[in-house]
Structure formats: C-alpha cells, structure tokens
Amino acid sequence: MDILHIPFYFEPGLGLYDMEKRFTFWASPEVREWFKARGYTLYERCWEEDMILDTSIPAIPPQTDCGEAEYPYAYFDTDSEEPEEPKMPLRSRDMTGKAGFAQDALGRHVAIKIVRADTDEYRILRFLHEQSLDTLKENSIIPVLELIPNGAFWFAVMPRWALYIDTPEPVYIHEVVFIVHSLLKDICSGNFLVNHITDDWIGIPRRGHLRAEKRLLSYGSFNLSNDTSAGEFDYNPFVLDVGGMGVFFCRKYQHITDRLPILAPLLDMMTHRNLKRRFTADEALLFFEDRAAELSEAELAAAIRPTKDREAGIKYDNYDRWEDLPPLFVDRWKKYRATPVPWYTRLLRRFCATEFGERYVPKASTMSKTAQGRITGTSGTRFTATFVLPGSGMQVNYLGNFSSSIQTFNSANATLKYNADNELTATRQFDGQLGVNNIKLTLTNGPVIEGVLDMPISPPSSVSGSGVWAIN
C-alpha cells in the first residue's frame, strides 16, 4: 500500500478517456486510506443513482456556516442563492478526474493534483513548493503546500480556491478596477482563482461582499474577437488572447464607461482592428495601472449605478464607448480611440458568414482543422463534447458547464473547428446559441463547437459558461 496504482492514462493518444475510472479512483477505500495515513481526509464522492459524478463534498461537515480566511486558505460559506436546490455545502467539482479534494488534520480545505514525475509541470511545482509563503503572496501565486511521492507520480497539495472573480456582479467602481486589473495580469480568466469557496454548482452571494470590502484575493496559476472573421490569412495567438480578453471586458463593462472612463481607451486598444496597434498584454496592464492610479478614493468608492443597459446584441466593434464622456478626457485620449469598422470590412465579414464564405474563405485562413464527434447535455448545467482529431485519431473531450440550467439535449452530428491542437487545452469560457435545431459554442481562444440537435429545443436561447479540455 506504499505506492498507489494510477489506473488511467495520462499521455494523449493512449486508451479511451474513462471518466468513471478516474472518479472511482478518488472514491476507492484504498485511496482514501492511503491519504488518511498522510493526514488528509478525501471528500466523499457524489452519485446520481448508480452513476458516479464529477462532484464531491467534504467528509467532515463544516461546524459553522462560514469561515474566515487564514492565508493561504480560503474563506468558506455554506450559504446558497438557490434555496430550492439540495443543500450540499462546499461541494467541489473537477471535470478531469486528475484532481481530488480533501481536508487536512485541522479541517482546512485543499486540492490534490496528480502530476507525473520528470515533467516540466512537476519541476515548476517543486520550485513553487520551495518558495516562502511571503514570496508567493507578494507575486500572487497560490502555494504548493506539499508534494507527496508516489512512484512515477507525485501528488501536489494546494489550498482549495475557486473560479469566477467577476461573479456576482460588482456594485462599486473599485470592484471593476480590481477585476480588470487581476485579469490583465494573466489574460485568461480560467487561470484565476479567488480565496472564497462555496458550493461550486450554485450561487456565491458572500463573494460579492468580500470583494466590495477589499478582502478578496485573486491569484493566477480567451477567441472572441473578429481578428479572422473576414478571412484573414494568419493571426498572432498572443495578440488574439488580448483581443479575446478585451471583448470579454466589453461584454461585461463597456456600458459603464461613463462611470469609469478609463475603460474606453483601454477596451478600444485591446480590440483594435489594426493588430500592430493593438495593446500587448504588458501594454494593457501598464496603461490600466497608470490610469487607475489617477483615480481618487471617492471615485473608487462610488457605486456603479449604470446609466445604460448592457446591450448584449451590439457587437463590441459597433459600440460607442466614448459617448457622454467629458470632452477634456476624449481630447486627451483621442489617439487611443478606434475608428468605426469600414464598410468594406463589414461587407467582407457578412460574406464570410454566408454558407459560401464559410465553405471557401476559411480554407485560406488558419481555422483549418475539423474534427467529427458528438455533444451530450447530461443534466442540469453540464454537457460533454467528444471529438476524434483528424490524422492522430486522438480523442478529445470538452467537459462543459452552462451558467444556468438548460434542457437535456443530444447532437450525434457535431463538429469542432480549430487551428492547432494546443488550442484544445486548459479551462476555456464560451458563448453561443442553443436551439431550435442547432447548437453553436464559440470558445474564448478560437475553436468553435457546433452541431445539429437530435430533437428540437424551443425556445432558442443564448448560452455561456466554461469547460475544461481533456485529451486522451
């Protein structure tokens, strides 16, 4: 019992992706006893009838409704915004099966990840483990508390933190500044965790209060832009990431530029059509830090109180973010103001969106690969999209979670369009449409998942959420 057998593959292309085997590993008595002997009590796995799920709950129930954060551990609370849902305090979710959750001897919540020895990932985790907590805190990096050896693998133990820095909606200007500044440090929302945990499936009411009180920490460990929508031949993935994050910010906050004017030049330069003029990640961060430093305490403490509706139907490059801004401000930053999309670009984009354009123009651009597969909405908010990549025959899975409950659906005829295999990695957010007869999801870093529904869903709806890629 000194070495645990890892009963599933880690290398891409070896064997089928067996989620049940991964989840069962963390639930097995042998594994639970192995970790208990090392000071960790694994969470109890959740089941739905005879099906093991990707969620688990603490084996040791919380003694209080909420707990304060003692760095590096997170705040926790058992509150819920959805009282009609079954109460499962501190329920966690990992869709890959490569991580489990546990409590240490003091009842503190941790995440445990399986890492193969002799890899760059292990070497990075070892380096972080050797750093002091003060150094890691100063650099906004979650610490590695312990590395437990296990033959050809290691178990990396870290504090359990959570996703979604921007949920619930901010109330004060300083909250928007905090969110934008945090995400600009990494340009990938899926890389950011916050030191507040609750039930991963339902509402997180206290997080908004912690953020408003400036007690929330956010540490780092997306293609929405139209950069290739007119059939452009190539793109820079780093520039595309900046554009994707810029569009994300536009969708969230461009309607409040009259309340926080520095967003207007920032968003225009992050989504600029001229990629040579577009901000780099460093330039965007430096610009925002310099402009945020000019805000007074009173301006930061002001309530947002939007004067405009968030108009989701207006695309980011058709929205006037400079409307109603002070003339002196507009004059100061006029060089950063993007010009309207010219008529010929709009015409070319409309052409590329037609059946003929989609069939022929993308062949000249970088969206050059198509994989066949299926999409299944399993229950509530969850879905799985499975594809076989052309050439290698490798199976990839996008394990997704809608931001709100949807009807059960299935698409046996689905496609994945992408540029390169390395796009099919990590946690990625998406936006899209579901119903009446089709589903289409556009991931934040470019890939598009779409399919014909086996049965119609009415009425159709806009959907959003996030998912994680797993390749085997």
Image (cartoon, rainbow, N blue to C red):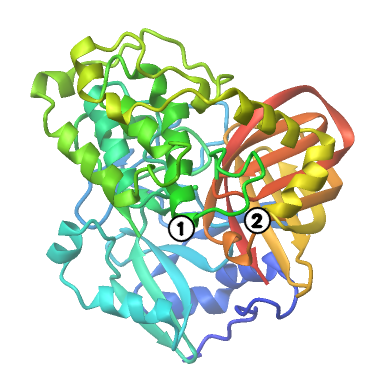
Residue 13 appears in which quarter of the rendering?
bottom right
Q: Position of residue 335 (x, y in %)?
A: 29, 29
Characterize the local packing of mark 2: few (<14), some (14-19) or many (20 or more) Cα atoms within 10 angstroms: some
Who's the residue at 33% across and 19% down the image?
257
Circle 1: is it few (<14), some (14-19), or many (20+) Cα within 10 Å? some
Q: Which x, y percent locates residue 98?
A: 54, 68
The local secondary structure at tag 2 comes to loop
Decide which of tag 2 and tag 1 comes sooner along the chain.
1
Above or below for 440 versus 366: above
Disc 2 or disc 1, which is closer to the eye?
2
Image position, residue 467 (x, y; %):
58, 50
Task: Find residue 366 and name its label.
Answer: 2
- Position of residue 21 relative to residue 160, above or below, is below
Q: Number of labelled discs?
A: 2
Q: Which mark, residue 59? A: 1
Circles 2 and 1, Cβ within 8 Å, touching? The answer is no
Residue 279 appears left or right of 173: right
Going 49% across and 90% down the picture, which residue do you hit?
A: 152
- Vertical arrangement, residue 371 with respect to residue 173, above or below: below
Residue 199 visible: no
The CA distance from mark 2 to mark 1 is: 48 Å
Question: Which residue type does callout 1 highlight?
Answer: Ala
- Identity of the residue drawn at 69% across and 65% down: 20
In the image, what residue occupies the spot 79% across and 67% down? 390
